[in-house]
Image (cartoon, grey):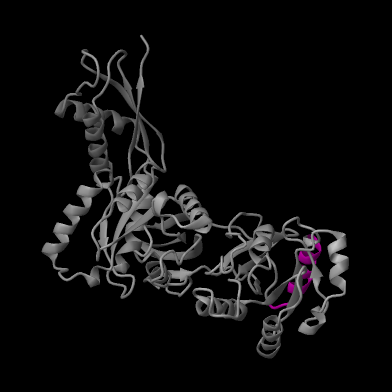
Amino acid sequence: MLKGLNKEKDNLPVIALVGRVNVGKSTLFNRLIEKDKALVSNIPGTTRTSNEGLVLWRGKYFKLIDTGGLTFTDDIPLEEDILKQSQKAMREADAVLFMIDAKTDILPQEKELAKSMRRIIQKPVVLVANKADSQKQETEFIGGAYYKLGLGEPFIVSAATGRRVGDLLDYIHSLLRKSKKRPKQKTEAEAIKVALIGKPNVGKSSLFNKIIGEERVIVNPMPHTTREPFDTAVIYNYQAGRKTLRQRIIFVDTAGIRRKTKVAGELEKIGIQKSIKAIEESDIILFVIDASVPLSSQDMQLGGLVEKRGKSVIILVNKWDLSEDNSDHQRHQAESRIYSHFPHLKFAPLVFVSGLTGYRAHQIMPLLIHAWEARQIEIPINALGDFLADATRRHRPTKGKGTRPPKIISIRQLRTNPPIIELAIKHHTSLHLSYVNFIENKMREQFDFFATPVIIKLRKLKR
């Protein structure tokens, strides 16, 4: 973990959802956390990296972990990694929900998993039979072979419809009240939301793990290993003068985004949609590009996607350690080349890093704090007036369309996070785009809008 970072300690009890593929764990996960967070499909192995969320029941919270579905075969990619993530979740959990499908018979592999759980897990295991969407289906299940698992009577539910899910929550709540960690009321401090984005295989997940100091997401050379956004909250302690400040930060690792013509299948399409949503909900973007390969049109499309959403941006040039020449001269050349491909992101600082070795990863956190503070800057009215007078004196406004010379009547800041500035223009005149860019750049220099776009809106006055 990077210096100053600590995993957020909420001391909440943890419940882990485990079971084979396609028993509905992710559907139940979404139902319990009341969010459409986990990716749901009928394709085996949809969930790979374990998902985490908070469940609120009876006014108190507990943590829920959705693990990848187990196939007990080598046919599904990353099965070994998924198994490790499931085992890790079970070790962290205070209780385990073992999910089965109420519509199918118990598989031999499920019996083996239940047997191993009884042997190695000294904590409560609750058997949950899912997909009993009606009373008839529940009645048909009663005569099933669930007793072969040796986990007691099952809770028969329907995650899709919510049938008897409240009864399950009541039972979990009573179970956790007897554990060392009990459900609690929870208030969360304001958090900076930071999303790592990039095309597939640029090393986002490696960087994510390096930043938070834990193997939280699966890393594999296989394209589109990460299928859905995964977030984790940390606390960053840093010095501001003589004070030590604490800042809550939520990092989100997203699925690799590539152009529509390259997208393979529904899962990748949904994963990309979730990644774009994560971008929209974030404050700061860590835009990851691969230093070991030339910049592509997909990189440039992603740069445009970020720029249009008014987010603060830090460009991470990953795999710099693999470059044949990583001298200062080569770094300066790379900077010029990158900015020439991303002219609208020239406000974004570049950091040359390695998710594999941690090279220069320590530079990321101070830049994030600087960018966050820049998003909050509110300029006094008098300072804005002085700025406008100085800027127009140095460089007279240039006209866009029309023949009349433009005149900027007034300037004001509409909001922060991101900063939005309004220029009131004399009626029947227009400003040239280059002059708007000039004002934006000058504002960034004078008021330290570091790594942050300055959005300028033009308002034409009436007569």
Closer to the camera in the image, 230 or 144: 144
Residue 256 is drawn in which quadrant? Answer: bottom left
Question: Which quarter of the rendered picture does the N terminus lie within?
Answer: bottom left
Closer to the camera in the image, 71 or 403: 71
Residue 257 in picture, x, y percent from top left: 41, 55
Residue 105 is drawn in which quadrant? Answer: bottom right
Q: Residue at x 72, y 77 (%)?
A: 179
Q: Is residue 184 left or right of residue 203?
A: right
Residue 241 in view in this figure: no
Q: Residue at x 29, y 33 (%)?
A: 383
118 in relation to 357, above or below: below
Q: Is residue 61 left or right of residue 265?
A: right
Residue 100 is drawn in which quadrant? Answer: bottom right
Q: Which residue is drawn at 60% across and 76% down?
A: 71
Assess whether residue 168 is covered by the magenta stretch. Answer: yes
Q: Is residue 324 left or right of residue 257?
A: left
Question: Which quarter of the rendered picture does the C terminus lie within?
Answer: top left
Residue 225 in picture, x, y percent from top left: 45, 67
445 in relation to 229, above or below: above
197 in relation to 406, above or below: below
Q: In this view, does 269 lie to the left or right of 364?
A: right
Residue 79 in picture, x, y percent from top left: 53, 77
Closer to the camera in the image, 240 or 162: 162
Q: Which residue is drawn at 46% across and 50% down?
A: 276
Magenta-drawn stretch, dominant element (helix, strand or loop): helix
Residue 56 in view in this figure: yes
In magenta, the rendered stretch is 166-180
Assess whether residue 365 is covered by the magenta stretch. Answer: no
